Image (cartoon, grey):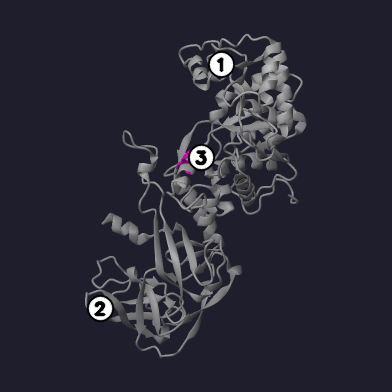
Amino acid sequence: MESSANSAAGPEAPVVSNFIRDMIKDDMKTGKWGGKVVTRFPPEPNGYLHIGHAKAICIDFGMAKEFGGECHLRFDDTNPSKEEDEYINSIKCDVNWLGFDWGPHLYFASDYFGKMYEYAVRLIKAGKAYVDDLTAEQIREYRGTLTEPGRESPYRNRSVDENMELFEGMRDGKFAEGARVLRAKIDMAHPNMNMRDPVMYRIMNASHHRTGDTWKIYPMYDWAHGLEDSAEGVTHSLCTLEFEAHRPLYDWFLAQLDDIHHPQQTEFARLNLTYTVMSKRKLLQLVREGRVSGWDDPRMPTISGLRRRGYTPESIRNFAERIGVAKRDSTVDLALLEFCLREDLNKTCKRVMAVLNPLKVVIENYPEGQVEELDAVNNPEDESMGTRKVPFSRVIYIERDDFMEDPPKKFFRLAPGREVRLRYAYFITCKDVIKDDAGNITELRCVYDPQTKGGDSPDGRSPKATLHWVSARHAIGAEVRIYENLFTKENPDEAEEGGTFLDNINPGSLKIITACKLEPSLSDAKAGEKYQFERLAYFCADKDSLPEKLIFNRTVTLKDAWVKIQKRG
């Protein structure tokens, strides 16, 4: 990366005090760590990042940026059976898209495999690690429970020479996968289960994406994690709460190697979001079972899925700042994330007109063959975005939901004999309703008032409704994908006995509309470009969109007063 480290473009939410920010401020005042701030974001390359990782990215990179430090991007690639270059590339893309840059500080756990092995040898020679022949199942059995101490392995007291010979044999591939492990010798009665002789190395006959077949043994995450932080000079190792119980183990390992740098680990609450699963394993299951179209399906909480749906990096960064940094887990309402998105899109999106469920309207007194170019505002929140021309002609399309033949009292849109305003155009009045043999409405016959061009009347009358529309002669066709929550329950893991989170998948989470009509300015929309379809919602051009087949994803809805009225009855 050539750009400056940890840069983040765009407006940010107001800075709010939190315990991590306060801790670093205190460290800077006291001169701890020599005034340095070095953080890291350490993803495992075994899946795509999700919105929970986005929060961690904003904290890790954000704190480093705020205090003039550096944040490392480090891939914890200690399990070659689950890691792929595809995931590495996607993670790099996501971090950059969020507005952050690791500069020259790109690292991998595999960079330190040789050093980790040397440290393991030091522990063996100090009598603090041993090779164990118990199976994985036996190790779990010997480990004990939260209320009962564990039992020592019969291989725990092997001599240093025997342990060295066996460990070297493990390294050289002399033993079968799973035949032996290297364990730390700590305390099988320790109240913290993580301290009961944890496994440091296991034999794996798998080719690594960077080291190939060089190694036959691979470090466990708990052994590698603290050593990686130490090797990189990390000062503030920021982790989510599930690592709190592991901190004593990291500290123990580093204390045994007392001549190396010892980072300070601090834990914060992970992000839980309503109607969402955050488990990589479950997200992978959704992908592999075809429940979604892929990791970047717009219904997925992955960063790539949010990006494809039309989320902006600014909205996600602002969301992360708004929810703050806590010490206790909680669940955040999805509505807050959507609020942050609307807030950003409202300021930055071009307004356009699109009709998703078209109803033909013929304006009988408008001259046949005549076309007018009307001025339309691109964004009333930002005058610098200017205006555009939209064509108007005798035949237009309006939304079918904007007409009722026999409307209820509080329906103010188009109805027989009623006048409404067409956005940027004229007032029209419905005179006749055309139906097919089955009684379905196929066309409306209306008249317009030529004196109301631009939406104002010389006599001061003002219709209660303003409708969007597109000229039938100039409209372009498009496919629109309407996305809802992927799950029907706020907590998808709440399933009936014997069920799983999959039972709560929303069968109506995707609706595809194929006969949409859009104003012609959208004909050259590029993938990723975002628009507000006036009166409808925010939409984003999908990556599969082509000039000959435009595809738009609904990003997030607008506030709809009529829906609220209907709900109130």
> Mark 1 or mark 3, which is nearer the start of the sequence?
1
Q: Is residue 145 magenta?
A: no
The residue under label 1 is which amino acid type?
Arg
> Mark 2 or mark 3, which is nearer the start of the sequence?
3
Q: Which residue is mark 1?
A: 196
Q: Secondary structure at mark 1?
A: loop
Q: Is residue 351 left or right of residue 72?
A: left
Q: Is residue 280 magenta?
A: yes
**Quarter of the image where one finds residue 402:** bottom left
Residue 71 lies, in percent from the top left, at 69, 40
Badge 3: residue crowd in 10 Å (few <14, some 14–19, many ≥20): some
> Which residue is more in the foreground, 178 or 186?
178
Q: Which residue is mark 2?
A: 435
Work out whether 14 lies above or below 527. Answer: above
Stretch in magenta: 277-283
The residue under label 3 is which amino acid type?
Lys
Q: Which residue is mark 3?
A: 280
**Quarter of the image where one finds residue 504:** top left
The residue at the point 59 percent across, 11 percent down is 155
- Whether residue 239 is visible here, answered yes or no, is yes
